[in-house]
Amino acid sequence: MTIQFAGAMAPSQSLAVADRLESFCATAEFDRPTLVIDVDRVESQYHALKAGLGHADIHYAVKANPHPAILRRLAQLGAHFDAASRGEIEMCLAAGAMPGDISYGNTIKRVPDIAWAHAHGITLFAADAEEELEKIATHAPGASVYIRVIVEVSMADWPLTRKFGCDRDTALKLLDYAKALGLTPLGFSFHVGSQTRKAEMWSPTLDAVAQLWADAKDAGHELTLLNIGGGFPAFYGEEIQAPTDYAAGVMAMVTERFGHIPRIMAEPGRGLVAEAGMIVAEVVLTSRKSDRDLHRWVYLSIGRFSGLAETEGEAIRYQFTTSHDGEPTGPCIVAGPSCDSADVLYEKRPMNLPLALKAGDRVLIRNTGAYTSTYSSVCFNGFPPLDVVAI
Amino acid sequence: MTIQFAGAMAPSQSLAVADRLESFCATAEFDRPTLVIDVDRVESQYHALKAGLGHADIHYAVKANPHPAILRRLAQLGAHFDAASRGEIEMCLAAGAMPGDISYGNTIKRVPDIAWAHAHGITLFAADAEEELEKIATHAPGASVYIRVIVEVSMADWPLTRKFGCDRDTALKLLDYAKALGLTPLGFSFHVGSQTRKAEMWSPTLDAVAQLWADAKDAGHELTLLNIGGGFPAFYGEEIQAPTDYAAGVMAMVTERFGHIPRIMAEPGRGLVAEAGMIVAEVVLTSRKSDRDLHRWVYLSIGRFSGLAETEGEAIRYQFTTSHDGEPTGPCIVAGPSCDSADVLYEKRPMNLPLALKAGDRVLIRNTGAYTSTYSSVCFNGFPPLDVVAI
């Protein structure tokens, strides 16, 4: 099968690796939708980001993809980890990470999980509320904490909701409260928003956090930690800055605003693993609802409930590769295989796909290494979850 | 713990059963969010629907909840099944269903799955496209089929998208095409839309299908099967018609429009199992983002990616019960426990919940027996999937 690229070309740096993934996928047989992960590509991306991040620690956002092969490789490379749950901490430890290199970055933690983490040597916790500090103080006495703040000036492709973080005044109060509870407040965390495609887009967010940082120092707090969170982008068709340039650009902007900070944490997830993954799926059906329809429907073997959850609201425009690329195309509504009418991937902006596409044809979905396999449902409509293979 | 009802009261018929579920849940301990299913309640709902549906066969929409205890009980009662995949057919057969009582109702089927179903005695398939009929004719030669049509006059709470079905002219052509391919076209299927709360709301849809039925007869087709699909409602706070009245009302409207049809299929899913389930979860955190915030945030141990997927767009307004019900309440944004900013259940319309609610408090979520456990992700953010217990 000859593979050609549909739509926009990837940045040249990704091509060689895409070739490796694609040559593997072109010959391998799969009996169900499968995510193939190139762990060497994760390693090269780690080095590329690290080269730009300098003395900042990379805490890999495990939620992006907790596959053991990824965690083991990153642990070998000396990466640190950002865990969202007890389950993710267990996976990091099993992969060889040291407890001191794992932060418990979810601001929403069950009491038994805090106690468990404390008992297993985790010493750094996120918080954005009084009640959370109280839980940590009781069940992980003396722990270090950082306060997550809301910064609402995002230029990201997908700005976050207000779910995480607190406002300036509350953040300052929580530093005091943490101290009063016997905790060690180290600094702040924030999140610039998912898929922030260029370093310069961090500017307004960093300005706002720097002001808060200065206010906290004026209030007598000795801050030693800044967690700049994630937001590192992956290629989904729109131009992004290359990883080393991007990371160096962000760090230069941090230094400009904050001077030297002893400890900086960065939490790439998508930006570290998305481009290392490719999903192999197939066309299950093509149809027209009516003779008058201008577009066709193309139904794939994978959908919103079996791995492509981030197509909700058509947020991510994945790049598809088919064996008919280069042949004439037409507009298609793309949908998943389930009996759920919400399981439609692209309808508001139909995709141009080859007219020759038919049931049984293979479809490769590029840069799907992040936020796919774990979103997959356990057995919605009786379909098994997305399979994962590491190469 | 004293349990009181928050918000609207359930219809009286549900109260006794809710009591059984609630008394079980009030004493049982769970270490993670758990769906408790009362299988006797499924049985009583089956009888209630069957009493109204008369000679129509109930094909339970397995996708609503494929728990083995539900499938076994329904098979014992003589129910038929509507399966969305090979996986669901396997579950039905394992539960004791006969192949002849299982329809393969997904219009989007992989070729190997069609062949497998044919080899295992499945003889009835849905289709809405030429390519699907070709696949069925080749891999399940001689099978019976029904054609799914689109009817766009729904009065349901959640009308379906255009994902399934074809228009009138295409439907008539597909009957001819099925015959030409050596298949046995029996009739039509349609779906009135999810959560159609009263029988009278079926009227415009049934009118449209009756016109198509008449057109097909005029064109010389002998039709013997009408699949009226699902749409049978569950109680989520808004008044619904009682199940026997509802089902009898729908059947009366069918008879009025179609006369006697030898074989009628009805596919309740939600309407059969939703009210038989209750999720036991807990509050993980309560907070305010700012001193100026009028609402609080309440974070639960379950969210959109661990079982409550149908809160997308705040579609379903689940009924919560807490141990503080009856105490003063205030507006709350309700969110899940993951680090995903999209994991927010109710924000546009905050919920009124007790002000005393705090981390660790138990929350019961009523009428959650349908479309919860199987939507749950395999391990998003490292959280295990929703556990299920049948009583």
Image: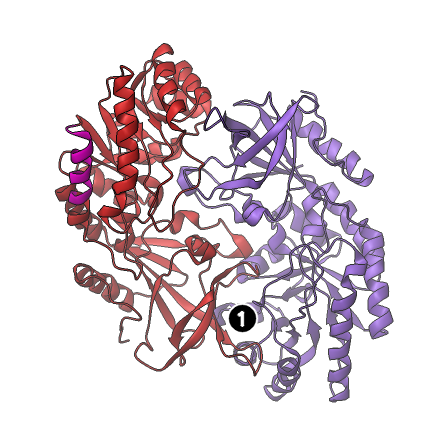
Chain colours: A red, B purple
Q: Is residue B240 magenta?
A: no
Magenta portion: prevailing SS class: helix
Q: Residue at x 73, y 89 (%)?
A: B219
Residue B329 shows in the view: yes
* Residue at which label 1 appears: B114
Q: Which amino acid, mark 1?
A: Ile
Describe residue A121's horizontal placement relative to residue B363 as left or right. Answer: left
Closest to the observer: B71 or A59? A59
Q: Is residue A254 magenta?
A: yes
**In this rendering, is residue A267 above or below B54?**
above
Q: Position of residue B139 (x, y in %)?
A: 53, 77
**In this rendering, is residue B315 above or below A182?**
below
Mark 1 Cα within 10 Å, few/some/many (few <14, many 20+)?
many
Q: Residue at x 67, y 62 (%)?
A: B98
**In this rendering, is residue A331 above or below B377?**
below
If the image is split into quadrants, where does the N terminus of chain B sit?
top right
Q: Position of residue A282 (x, y in %)?
A: 41, 68
Residue A56 shows in the view: no
Q: Position of residue A114 (x, y in %)?
A: 40, 23
Closest to the observer: B222 or A211? A211
Describe residue A219's horizontal placement relative to residue B105 as left or right. Answer: left
Q: Disc 1 is attached to a residue of which chain?
A: B
Q: Which residue is drawn at 61% across and 58% down?
A: B93
Describe residue B280's horizontal placement relative to residue A187 as left or right. Answer: right
Closest to the observer: A127 or A116? A127
Q: What stretch is highlighted in magenta?
A: A248-260
Q: Position of residue B41 (x, y in %)?
A: 74, 42
If the image is split into quadrants, where does the C terminus of chain B sit?
top right
